[in-house]
Structures are given as C-alpha cells and as structure tokens.
Image (cartoon, helix red, strand yellow):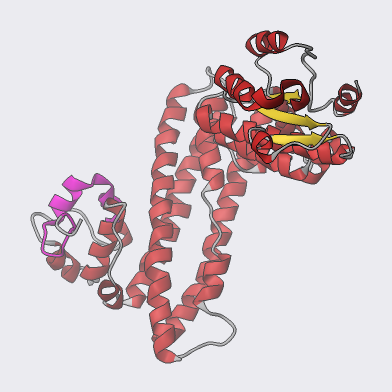
Amino acid sequence: MKDREFTINMKLSDLLISNPQLILMLPRFGIGLGFGDKRVVDICKKHNVSASLFILICNIYTFDEYTPSIDQILDIDGNSLIKYLQTSHRYYLEKRLDHIGKHIERIAAQCGDSGPLLINFFSDYKNEVASHFQKEEECTFPYISALLENKKPSGYSIDDYVKEHDNIEDKLNDLINIIVKYLPEEILPDERISVWFDLVQVAADLNKHAKIENSILVPFVRIIENKIR
Amino acid sequence: MGLEKLFSQHNNCIEIIKTVYSMEQLQDSITAYKPDAIVLNPAHTGSSTPSFVNNIRKQNSNVSIIALLYSYLENDLLNCFDATIGLYDNTSHIFELIESLEEKTGQENSQNNSEGEELSPREIAIVALVAKGHTNKEIADMLNISVHTVTTHRKNISKKTGIKSISGLTMYAMLNKLI
C-alpha cells in the first residue's frame, strides 16, 4: 500500500490519471483547472490549501484499504478539514442532489400513480441528508472550532457525534435499485441509465465522506479533546 | 393423529404434505415432495436410527428432522436429530420450535441463492403488510408467527430486493402491484 500512496510531490495531473474521480475534489478545495504540470504541493500553496489534507483525502478517495497514520492525523489543519467538509455538504445538496432531483422529476412524470411516491421518496431522502448535515454544522463543527481555539465547551463531545452519526446510505441504495430494477421497462430508459450513474457516483462519494468523518475527523478531535482536558 | 391436528391449527406456517407408515413410503415421499421437515418416531427405527437419518440427509440435505419422543432416548440417538417434540410439550413450545427451524431453512436458502431470487409468497405477504404501514409486531400477530420470524423475513426481503427502507418497500409493493 505505502508504495502506491499519493504524495504531495506528485503531479496533480498524474493523480487524476490514476483516479479521474479526484477531479471532483478540486472545486471543493477551490483549486481551478489549467494547473499544467505542477506538483500537488505547489498548486496547494498557490490556492492556500493544506497540501497534507488534500493528499490525505485523495488517498482515501482512491485506495479503499487506506488508513491514515496517527502522525498524518496530527498533521491536519483542523479549520481546513471543517471547511472541506462544509464545502462538500454544499456540493452534495446544491449540486448533486439538485441535479439528480431534476432527473427524478422527469422520470416520475411518466410513472402514473407511482410518480408522486417517487417524488416523495426522493424528497424525504434529500431532507434526511440535509438534516444530517445540519446537525454537524450546527453542533459538531462549532464544537471543533472552539476546541481549536483551546476552549472546551461543556455538554458535547465527539462521543455524542459518534453515537448520533446515523447512516444516510439506505434510502440512496433503495433508490438505485428502484430506478433500474423496479420501474417498468418502458419508462425513460436513457434518463434512468444517466441518473443511475449519478446515483452510484454520489453513493460512492458519500461513502468516502463518511469514512473521512469517522476515520479522520473523529480521531483528530479525540486527540485535541485529550490535550485540552 | 394428534400431531396432525395440532399442526393444522398453525395453518399459516405448516402444511402437512404426507403422513407415511413405512420407511419405503418415507423415502419415496422425500424424493417426490422435498419437504422442509420430517417428524419421525425413533421407536420405529430403533438402533438403526442414526444410519437411517443420515440416509435421509443424503437424499435431501436441507430437510429438518424432528424426533417425536414417546419414551426416553439415548443421547447418541438424540444427537442425530435437529429437534425433538415430546408427548407432553405444549402447543406454543412446538410452534416455536417449528418457527425456529423455518428460520434456519430460510437463512440457509438465502445464503445459498439470495441474489436475483424472486420473493416467496410468504415474503410477498409481508412486504404488502409493511407497505400498508404495519409494524413487525402487528405483522407477527396477523400471521401467527413470532416477531423474530418477521425480522428474519424482512432481512431476507432486503437481501433479495436490495431495498431496506420502509418507504422503499412501499414503492416496491406499489410498482409490483402488491397493494
């Protein structure tokens, strides 16, 4: 594994050849296109992005078995991590789910009696995701920001977050199955194939997002909680 | 027979396929009907019980073999059965036993070929009830089975359809005209 891991001295274009999905990370870090043949470290510097965080996230998105070491976690800039997670939330809700919603509306319009059910199913899912993100943004992230300023707010800890961190995958997987397996054959096949790719992609993305929260954010916060205590 | 009458009271779950009176008849029936379970009185097979039971398993590896005990049976002989029913066992004990065997068979079947398999009539009935908004407890009462059995069915349904949420199952039921 170690010898395959990405490092900050590699060319960004080489990372994208290894894993084209990583192009989705660039807007979340505010990195534009047209970066030529520059190394990750130089591109990050230009855009004022933590290169170690960027490369850590690229590794998580590319290698399923990748788990960061304690040193790598200690090296993280907490504010950058929170900013990245928040930007990702916006991306899922405002870009991906909005786009998927438009496909779903067109499909539902052809579904007769089941149409409203499909619309409701998707909007329930979207609300579930939104409230999941909202909880993190209103409780967890402000708590972490306070810790980073050496304050220890009472009445909340990262253990509460772990306990409450519910999974938002079930409904999305249900939707993937319904779209392809259970809607009648004749309903908009091209549109369904297209939205299926979108759904599978966002499911994989959310899965890695959860991994970042569970295997980077949580241990990172535990370390600072213990330091301040 | 008392046992037949008792099983028929639990008609949601158990179908008596055939009552046989000789070993030859039994072997023919296993091939013909592929039963889920066989109730056998070891007093009829005596010391040849283990080899007899093994032969049945060779014929049909998925079958549950239940001993009907009239009298004391040595452990060696008891061990070759999946379960036992005693003369003095009460009805609910016997029903629970049958349900636990049903679950075992269900789990084995779903491990063998859960992917791409159609729902069984029982599972279809449960999906329809879930879609109508009934809880597992209500479904258990309606179908006269334990909540645990309903949960097992629900797990198998999700494995087969790929759908876990209640609202997803409702859509599934509607698209398949189950409700």
Quadrant containing the N terminus of chain B is top right
The residue furthest left is: A37
Q: Which sits in the foreground, B65 or B105?
A: B65
Q: Residue at x 29, y 66 (%)?
A: A68
Q: Quadrant of the C terminus of chain B?
A: top right
Can you say whether A193 is above or below A56 in the image? above
Q: Residue at x 50, y 36 (%)?
A: A176
- Specify whether residue B174 is in view: no
Residue A188 in the image: state x and y as whole percent: 49, 23
Residue A182 location in percent, x, y?
A: 57, 26
Using the rendered image of the protein, determine whether residue B137 is visible from the camera's viewpoint: yes
Q: Is B49 on the left-hand or right-hand side of B97?
A: left
Residue located at (68% from left, 23% from top): B36
* x then y, percent, for residue B56: 61, 20
Q: How many marks?
A: 0
The one nearer the camera, A137 or B55, is B55
The answer to whether B77 is drawn above or below residue A80 in the figure is: above
In terms of depth relative to the viewer, which is nearer, A12 or B144?
B144
Q: Residue at x 77, y 25 (%)?
A: B43
Picture quadrant of residue A119: top right
Q: Determine whether, in the image, residue B111 is placed left or right of residue A73.
A: right
Please tell me whether residue A139 belongs to the stretch shown in magenta. no
In the orientation shown, which residue stands out farthest toward the front? Answer: B47
Overall secondary structure of the magenta section: helix
Q: Is residue A16 magenta?
A: yes
Left or right of B158? Residue B69 is right
- Residue range in magenta is A4-26
For this rendering, which residue is in front, A158 or A80?
A: A158
Percent position (x, y) of residue B118?
A: 59, 23
